[in-house]
Image: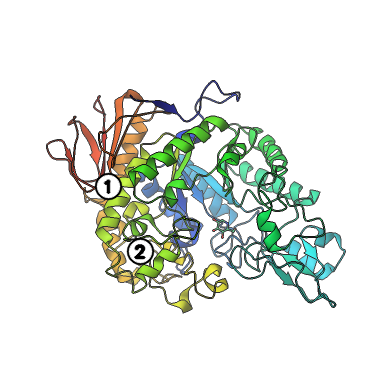
């Protein structure tokens, strides 16, 4: 028996716009410093993105999401923002930004920018002012400053650890300590301070007025905090339930912030959109995604799943259910700037696990430390599975987020010398965690190492391996069997096929084969196993491996449709 699922139901209490653009969009994430370098300084920039507008249009995406391009000392790849309403001079000017928006809009591509509200850079004017103004000042109220403990206050206020490793408090010259949940250079803001709130509203208007269509909200679950004394120890903190009253994570009152932002978004026509990066208990995700809040929330479950039919099916069922609760559409992600690329994850024989059972994605790189060519990594299997997983994802209702370079089938770059690494997670973990540089290496556009594989004349800020030439966009452009051609074909078809948000599971007759139908007879079949699977239909629109005589090979996905597209 088949069951029809739909990501949101018209019978929910929410008044849902039937089809705002983002509900079933394909959003392509650009990590600007590693996308394309127009001025040859070794760092990708905004004009570089503009120069690739035709490429992006040809790919067939609906929107780009730009990771931070704001002035930053790059203590955390730009997520340490020194000025929220400007462009890093190394990446261009506001004029360049406007040109990029125009170029993308001319090609029907929407623009989403990253907002980083939990913390600023320590170079932000506010933090510099707070350091100069001293204890008790209004300037320090914008951040979370506390006295130390011990007789002379030389010990941190608590033993809390930062998410990037090491202590979460840093002492300043006059002896006070400030909280930083991430790197030392990322002081947490105090969201109880009205000036902080007002300033972010100003920032949202600033970019919306410049034509930006939406926002990705960094660490959306941690802005508001209740740090009334006495502060709990880290052991006590871990025991506090995440029920909306936790001192630091996923507090109910964070939604007051988003309710105010929603008024800003809705003051534009069309309303600006937002997506929350919120690592919270599943049951609490819908509130972030509600139409009164940010409107959509990331779901990172596919990204954490193995290439496994059971796991994929559960992830889809659970998240379509959550979308029904929020009234939003689901989001799907296989790769982003924080995790090992999915072609590599799927090529590792035994993805290592954290003690809690989650895949230890970053630590998985220990398997391929010998330069990405370790016998442990089966590149071809990884790529085969990655294509199958991607085509599965693109068949789902909701919005799919792609990460730059995945369309080329790129693998993680594992062999970055320690001296070239940039990610604070590498340094703060004493090198135990290799960090995220391996998925942030500048893209190979051409086969020529002289121009950093077409990235730019000035080299590349992270070293590119020789094998990049085999993945260059130029080499894949006209090759109908390439990963790039597959993504283009799939995205073109998806535009034509995508109508309602229903999904109907079909019994495939095999535990390792998932099969579902979308409106208009569009079918998606993924064979997670290695044994070929007999399709009972021959009308294949696209597949990740060749379908011969109705046989779908192992580790592949096919799309079928009753009506020719
Ligand atoms: C989540 C971002 O995706 C990540 O790259 C960043 O390091 C942290 N937030 C801190 O801003």
Q: Residues within 10 Å of mark 1 (few under 14, many from 20)?
A: some
Residue bearing the label numbered 2: 454
Residue 212 seen from this side: no
The answer to which of marks 1 and 2 sits earlier in the sequence is 2
Q: Considering depth in this image, is 241 or 442 the residue closer to the camera?
A: 241
Q: Residue at x 67, y 41 (%)?
A: 258
Which residue sits furthest left?
Answer: 549
**Ligand 1 found in image quarter:** bottom right
Classify the position of the C terminus by image quarter: top left
**Secondary structure at numbered mark 2:** loop
- In the image, taking residue 451 as reference, residue 269 lies left or right, namely right
Vertical side of 480 occupied by 124: above or below:
below
- In the image, taking residue 30 as reference, residue 281 lies left or right, namely right
Q: Residue at x 66, y 36 (%)?
A: 262
Classify the position of the N terminus by image quarter: top left
Vertical side of 46 occupied by 377: above or below:
below
Alpha carbon of mark 1 to alpha carbon of mark 2: how far? 19 Å
Q: Considering depth in this image, is 391 or 110 the residue closer to the camera?
A: 391
**Secondary structure at numbered mark 1:** helix
Between disc 1 and disc 2, the foreground one is 1
The answer to whether mark 2 is within 8 Å of ligand 1 is no
Q: Residue at x 55, y 60 (%)?
A: 92
Q: Considering depth in this image, is 328 or 311 the residue closer to the camera?
A: 311
Q: Position of residue 90 (x, y in %)?
A: 55, 65
Vertical side of 421 occupied by 328: above or below:
above
Residue bearing the label numbered 1: 485
């Amino acid at each position: 028996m088949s069951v029809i699922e739909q990501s949101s139901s018209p019978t929910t209490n929410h008044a849902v716009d039937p089809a705002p653009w983002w509900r079933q969009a394909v959003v392509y994430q650009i990590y600007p410093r590693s996308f394309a370098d127009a001025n040859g300084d070794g760092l990708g920039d905004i004009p570089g993105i503009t120069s690739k507008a035709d490429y992006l249009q040809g790919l067939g995406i609906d929107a780009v999401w730009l990771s931070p391009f704001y002035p930053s000392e790059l203590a955390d790849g730009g997520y340490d923002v020194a000025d929220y309403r400007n462009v890093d001079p190394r990446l261009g000017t506001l004029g360049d930004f406007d040109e990029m928006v125009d170029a993308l809009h001319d090609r029907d591509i929407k623009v989403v920018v990253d907002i980083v509200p939990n913390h600023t850079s320590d170079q932000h004017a506010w933090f510099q002012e707070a350091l100069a103004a001293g204890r008790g000042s209004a300037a320090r109220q914008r951040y979370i400053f506390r006295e130390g403990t011990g007789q002379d206050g030389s010990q941190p206020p608590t033993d809390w650890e930062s998410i990037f490793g090491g202590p979460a408090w840093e002492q300043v010259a006059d002896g006070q300590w400030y909280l930083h949940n991430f790197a030392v250079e990322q002081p947490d803001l105090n969201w109880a301070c009205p000036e902080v709130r007002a300033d972010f509203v100003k920032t949202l208007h600033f970019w919306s007025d410049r034509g930006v269509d939406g926002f990705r909200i960094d660490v959306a679950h941690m802005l508001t905090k209740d740090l009334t004394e006495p502060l709990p120890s880290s052991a006590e903190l871990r025991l506090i339930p995440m029920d909306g009253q936790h001192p630091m994570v996923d507090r109910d009152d964070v939604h007051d912030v988003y309710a105010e932002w929603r008024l800003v978004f809705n003051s534009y026509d069309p309303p600006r959109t937002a997506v929350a990066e919120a690592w919270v208990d599943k049951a609490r995700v819908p509130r972030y995604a509600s139409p009164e809040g940010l409107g959509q929330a990331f779901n990172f479950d596919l990204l954490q799943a193995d290439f496994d039919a059971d796991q994929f099916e559960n992830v889809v069922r659970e998240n379509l259910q959550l979308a029904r609760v929020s009234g939003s559409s689901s989001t799907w992600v296989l790769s982003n700037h924080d995790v090992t690329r999915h072609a590599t994850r799927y090529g590792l024989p035994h993805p290592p696990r954290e003690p809690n059972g989650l895949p230890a994605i970053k630590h998985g790189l220990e398997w391929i430390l010998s330069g990405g060519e370790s016998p442990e990594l089966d590149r071809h299997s990884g790529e085969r599975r990655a294509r199958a997983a991607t085509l599965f994802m693109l068949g789902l209702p909701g919005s799919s987020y792609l990460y730059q370079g995945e369309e080329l089938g790129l693998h993680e770059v594992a062999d970055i010398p320690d001296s070239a690494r940039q990610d604070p997670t590498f340094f703060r973990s004493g090198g135990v965690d290799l960090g995220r540089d391996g998925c942030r290496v500048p893209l190979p556009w051409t086969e020529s190492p002289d121009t950093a594989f077409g990235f730019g004349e000035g080299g590349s800020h992270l070293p590119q391996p020789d094998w990049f030439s085999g993945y260059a966009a130029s080499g894949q452009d006209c090759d109908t069997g390439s990963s790039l051609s597959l993504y283009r074909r799939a995205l073109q078809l998806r535009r034509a096929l995508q109508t309602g948000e229903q999904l109907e599971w079909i019994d495939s007759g095999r535990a390792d084969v998932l099969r579902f139908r979308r409106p208009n007879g569009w079918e998606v079949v993924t064979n997670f196993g290695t044994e070929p699977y007999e399709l009972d239909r021959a009308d294949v629109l696209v597949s990740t491996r060749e379908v011969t005589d109705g046989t779908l090979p192992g580790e592949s996905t096919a799309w079928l449709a009753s009506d020719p597209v």
